[in-house]
Image (cartoon, grey):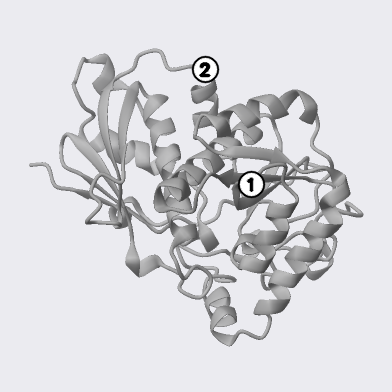
Amino acid sequence: MTAENARAGSAVPDASAVAAALQIARRAPSLHNSQPWRLIFDGKRLHLHSDPDRSLPMADPDGRQQVISCGAMLHHTRTAFAANGWHTDVVRLPDPARPRYLAALAFRPWPDPPERIRTQAKVIGRRYSDRLPMDEPEGWDALLPGVTEVARTCEVTLDDLPGSVRERLAAASDQAEALRRYDKPYQSELRWWTGHFDLPEGIPPTALATAAEAGRVPVRRDFPTAPGPTRRATPEDRARLLTLSSAEDSPAHWLRTGEALSAVLLECTGAGLSTCPLTHITELPAARRVIAGLLPHHLRPQVVVRVGSAPEPDPMPPTPRLPIEDILTVTTT
C-alpha cells in the first residue's frame, strides 16, 4: 500500500487506496472473529456500519460486543490510513435514527503522522489473540504509562489489576462460564464460530488452546479445545490482567471502548508482547459487578485484556478474514 494519492495532493484517497487500507485494517479483532462491520466509500467519505447478519444474539443480545468490535475496526482503519498519509476526521454515530451507522470518516492529507501511529500500523499483521499461558510481560512497568495514555485518548480508563485480585477474577470467569455451560443455544452459537478450517470467519483450530494449555489459564473463555501436542510448557499463566472501562453503557461508549482496545493491543504488540481480549466476563451482570468491585472507581468495565510474553517464538497462523469485497462497497462513479 502506498501514499501515492496523498503525495500527489489529492483531496481524498481513491477507491483502490481505500481498499488497500482496509486490506490491512480488516485484521481488527472481533467477537469470535465475526467481523461484524460493513464499510461504504462514496468517493468522499468512508462510512462504517455494523452488520445485523453477523450478530451473535446468544453471547451478545444487546449488541454491545458488536459495537466494541466495530470500534476496533474504526481504530485499525484510521491507523492504516494515517500511516499512508491520510488524516481521518470522524463523526461518531452521525444519525441517531440509524443506530447501525457508527461512524463517518472524512479525509485530508497528513504527510507526517506521529511515529507511534506508524509503529502501530506496522504491527497490525502481527497481532493475534494468544490463548496460551504466558509469562509476565517484559518491560511492563516502563510500557504501562504509554498503554494507559492511548486508552485515555479514546476516553476510556485502563486499570492494571494487581496480582492480589487474580483469584477473584478467575472465580468470576469460572462463574460466567458455569452459568453458560448448559445453555444450549449459547453453546451451539459458540461452536458454530469455532473449529472450522475452511471458512473466512470464526476461530480456526490453530488459534485454540489444547485442554492442557487452557487448564493453565485461569481467566479465559471456555472455547472448544484443540487436538494435538502442548505447544507451550509455561507451568502457569502469569499474564497481566487489564480492564477497559467507560463512563456509561451506551453505543457511543462501546464504540470508544473498541477504539481503545485496538490502540492498547497494537501498543503492546509493538513492544513485543502477546495479548488476548476477554469479553465473556462482562457478558453477564453478576460477573461484571465482581469486576467493578475490583476497580478503584465507579466506571463500567467493558473488556478484560491479558498481556504477557510468549516464552518462545511461536507465532500463530493468521486467523482468516473475509475478502475485501464482502466488507467494502464503493458507490462512487
Can you give x and y, in whole percent of width and height, for residue 13 in the image? 23, 29
Q: In which quadrant of the rendered view does residue 332 lie?
A: top left
Mark on residue 298? 1
Question: What amino acid is labelled 1 in the image?
Answer: His
Of tags 1 and 2, which is closer to the observer?
A: 1
Q: Residue at x 50, y 49 (%)?
A: 248
The residue tagged 2 is 115
Can you give x and y, in whole percent of width and height, for residue 276 in the image? 66, 50
Asked if residue 36 can be seen in this view, the reply is yes
Q: Would you say 209 lies left or right of 301 here?
A: right
Q: Would you say 73 lies left or right of 299 here?
A: left
| Cα distance in 3D space between marks 1 and 2 | 34 Å
Can you give x and y, in whole percent of width and height, for residue 125 in the image? 53, 40
Q: Residue at x 67, y 60 (%)?
A: 289
Quarter of the image that includes the C terminus: top left
Q: Would you say 126 lies left or right of 172 here?
A: left
Q: Residue at x 36, y 42 (%)?
A: 22
Question: What amino acid is labelled 2 in the image?
Answer: Glu
Q: In which quadrant of the rendered view does residue 242 lie?
A: top right
Element type at mark 1 = loop
| Up/down of 24 relative to 213, above or below | above
N-terminal-most mark, 1 or 2:
2
Q: Would you say 124 lies left or right of 274 here?
A: left
Say whether marks 1 and 2 touch (CB < 8 Å): no
Element type at mark 2 = helix
Can you give x and y, in whole percent of width and height, for residue 321 in the image? 45, 55
Front in this rendered view, residue 118 or 37:
37
